[in-house]
Structure formats: structure tokens, C-alpha cells
Image (tube, rainbow, N blue to C red):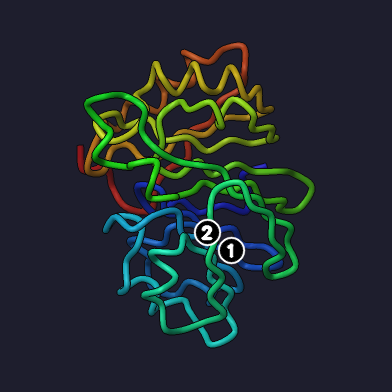
Amino acid sequence: MLDAFTWFKQSSLLWRGSPTVYIDPWGITDGQPPADLILLTHAHFDHLSEVDLAKITTDGTVVVAPHDIAAQLTRGDVRAVRPGEKLEAAGLQIETVAAYNVKPDRLDFHPRDNNWVGYLVPLGAHRYYFAGDTDHTPELDEVRADVAFVPIGGTYTMDVDEAAGAIKQIRPKLAVPYHFGFVVGTGGDGERLVKAIAPIEGAVLSPMHPFEL
């Protein structure tokens, strides 16, 4: 379920399949394939990088993004989305899920009114959830996916314990932590999450870039 994925750093992922899909590209290394589809969750620098978009975007690339980002993009087939929508993009049936903070000390980081998103995406034989930057929200409890990528760094998103509670609501076959070890969280947080969600299976990818924290 993870063999086709490359984790660059933070929430930046590549799925090498048909189509070729990037999620929140940041820190893309040289020699990566052009994108058929790019999914952007929100406007922060570690999720929306013009330098990295330029490396992988062609005129035929479908770029799915919240409205505030879509209005800024000038290359590719740009599709603007809001939470709770369904759309077809690059031959995939995609759903958007609200991504926002609910803890009082985080409300200014990812306000609900920004209409930022996570994504539910069928890739190959499995359904994947890419949560984006979010707390444990009521909408997250409704997510059903085979594989769930969830942020665990704390400060701006769920921490390990909060993410473990969210995963136990989603009940995926496999949970994968991201958004840690760069900017926030430590490199060891991934293994902490794997232990916290047992008996749900967890797996920690190795990033292309070394952990910073």
C-alpha cells in the first residue's frame, strides 16, 4: 500500500502510478517525473511552494487546490475546491474533507473559514486519506479510508496523542504519520504514533531529506 510513495519532507508526497500524483510538493528532489495531478491542501509555505510546483507542473497537469490558492496559479488545469466536494481529476474520483483547527491555541493557524482541505483519493486498489493540516475535527471522524496519512507534529496540527485518537475513529487498515521532524515535531514521533495506535497497523516512511528536528 506504500510501495509507490515517496515522502520528501513534511506533507510532501509523490505517488508513482498512473496518474502520477503529488500532494503538497515541497522539497522535490531533482529528476522526479512531471505531475499528472497535484493536490494542494492550503496556502502555507511548507505546502504551497512555487519553486517546487515549477519543477513538476506542465500545461496538462491538473492542479486541485482551495479557492484562495487556485486564484494565484497560472499554469496547468486548475480546479478550485471547497470542503465536502466531489470531483473528477486526472481520471480519479476525489473527495475533499475540511481541514482546520479546533483547539483554542491553534485557531489562527488554520481557521475553518479558510475552507482548506484534505483529500480522499483512490490510488490503485486502495483509498487514501491525506489529511493536510488539521486537528481532530468532527468531519475527520466520518472519513473512511484504507490508508490514512495524518499530521502529528503538534503546535499547528494534531500531536501524536490527538492523531492516535483520530486514527482510532477512522479505523484504516494502515496509518502513516507525516508533518513531523521538519518545522515541528521530532523525528521519533512517527514511531511513537505507531505504538499509540495498536492494534491498528502503522508505518513510518523514510523521508528523502534528513529530519531537521
Q: Residues within 10 Å of mark 2 (few under 14, many from 20)?
A: many
Q: Quadrant of residue 112?
A: top left
164 horizontally vs 148: left or right: left
The Cα–Cα distance between marks 1 and 2, rounded to whole angstroms, is 6 Å
Q: Percent from the top left, x then y, of residue 190?
A: 40, 28
Which residue is situated farthest in the bottom direction here?
A: 59
Tell me the element at label 1: strand
Answer above or below: position of 68 versus 85: below
Answer above or below: position of 175 versus 131: above
Q: Residue at x 46, y 33 (%)?
A: 177
Tell me the element at label 2: strand
Q: First in sequence: mark 1 or mark 2? A: 2
Q: Quadrant of residue 4?
A: bottom right
State the quadrant of the C terminus.
top left
Q: Amino acid at mark 1?
A: Val
Q: Percent from the top left, x then y, of residue 58?
A: 51, 84
209 horizontally vs 17: left or right: left
Name the residue tied to disc 2.
14
Q: Nearer the viewer, residue 103 or 26?
A: 103
Mark 1 and 2 residues: CB-CB less than 8 Å, in contact? yes
Name the residue tied to disc 1.
21
92 horizontally vs 129: left or right: right
Answer above or below: position of 188 versus 21: above
Q: Residue at x 45, y 41 (%)?
A: 99
Q: Residue at x 24, y 37 (%)?
A: 184
Answer above or below: position of 5 versus 69: above
Q: Amino acid at mark 2?
A: Leu
Q: Nearer the viewer, residue 85 or 179?
A: 85
